[in-house]
Amino acid sequence: MKLNILAFAVPLFVVFMLLEYYVARRRKMQLFDLHTSIANVSIGIMERLTDVLTAGTFYFVYDYLQKNFGIFDIKPGVAVWILLLLGTDFIWYWYHRLAHEMNVFWAVHVVHHQSEDFNYTVSARITLFQAIVRTGFWCVLPIIGFPAPMITVMLLIHGLYPFFVHTQVIGKLGILEYFLVTPSHHRVHHACNDQYLDKNYGDVLIIWDKLFGTFEKEDEKPVYGLTKQLHTYSFLWQHFHFLVELWLTVKQQKTFKDKFKVVFGSPNLIDPEVRGKAEIIFGIEEHHEPLQQRLSNYVVWQVIVMLVALFAFILFEHQFGYSAKFLFTSFTILTLINCGAIMEQKQWIFAVEFLRMLVVGSALWLFNADYHIVTFFIVTALLLLVLFYRTVEERYLSVVYTVKE
């Protein structure tokens, strides 16, 4: 039986996160906020799932470009692997730098910087949109002539290293600080202190920052997050808030030239008042009331179940058909939206729960041999739910929250 080795990234992530939490507790360091960590892990679950579903496409793109447009026909060798590592890291530096300097790229990268905590859960804050943009930059490698298998292996290795630099429990690392990206260097990158903004873009090697003048060492205690904090756990809003802000800012511009300048210009060009307008349009507001313990437990258990399910799905992904993949992806998205909505204490979460039940019902119907019995129970349950939707919703919300009159 063929196993997907990428699945084991999930339990390894959990193990290192728990180790970091243990060390932080021993040192009495307050590094974890429960709901912030849940928001971080939720984004990571979605990224890992979509990465598995799209990995074959990315490989096809690299392979097609190398075979049809490759300048050289490069063969594996020790020197070539070293050259590929340097090339991959160099391209990452420029992708990462441009992702901070151009709104069109910042829109997909901003999610990684939203957390006001800084720990291993932050490393999970990557989106499919960012993966697509990065792939566009890395397409330079197959055009040069590096074969797709080499690129894929290198990207796996290159993508593993940054996980370990998202931590506060590791201090400065002596001589390694001169040429590697260390936790100290990356803490600077995630800080919103004025002196740390737009610094330390390197992924594995810090030499590019020193070469191109974007290096800053860690002196002042970092404050993490955005310069204007997001203050929301909403899974959807974390992904799309900047696109909305960018769109509203572009609409304010009178000439095409000014609109173009905003899209491809610096995030500093975004109107500071736009965030508030966007939040009003979409009903986003910071919720100050503490979440009840039973709801926190409900959310935590949903995330735990999704991590276990994700591990199993990735492990046996090659055995699932398109219908199963679609249903699992749909259930995952709805669950992550549900978790964020509960932490935001939104009244519309029952609609999400209803959709989750539809997905579960569809899975039961699709994968059960006795279609007649399953269909009868599903149709009956849905009919009762539709007829008494408001009653069930009110009862659900009375259990989940105290419904406001």
Image: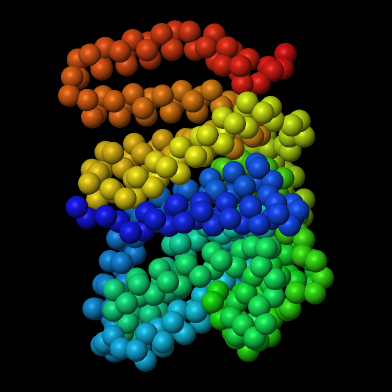
Residue at image coords 30%, 29%: 363
To which quarter of the image does residue 38 belong?
Answer: top right
Residue at image coords 58%, 55%: 19
Residue at image coords 44%, 12%: 385
Q: Position of residue 320 (x, y in %)?
A: 25, 44
Res 153 seen here: yes
To which quarter of the image does residue 120 belong?
Answer: bottom right
As drawn, 333 above or below 23:
above
Q: Specify the farthest residue to the front.
A: 26
Residue at image coords 47%, 85%: 86
Q: Position of residue 238 (x, y in %)?
A: 60, 48
Q: Specify the farthest residue to the left.
A: 369
Q: Position of residue 192 (x, y in %)?
A: 75, 63
To which quarter of the image does residue 262 belong?
Answer: bottom right
Res 246 seen here: no
Q: Position of residue 201 (x, y in %)?
A: 61, 74
Of residues 35 and 395, which is closer to you in this image? 35
As drawn, 159 above or below 113:
below
Horizontal arrangement in the rendering, residue 383 relative to residue 260 (left or right): left
As drawn, 179 above or below 100:
below
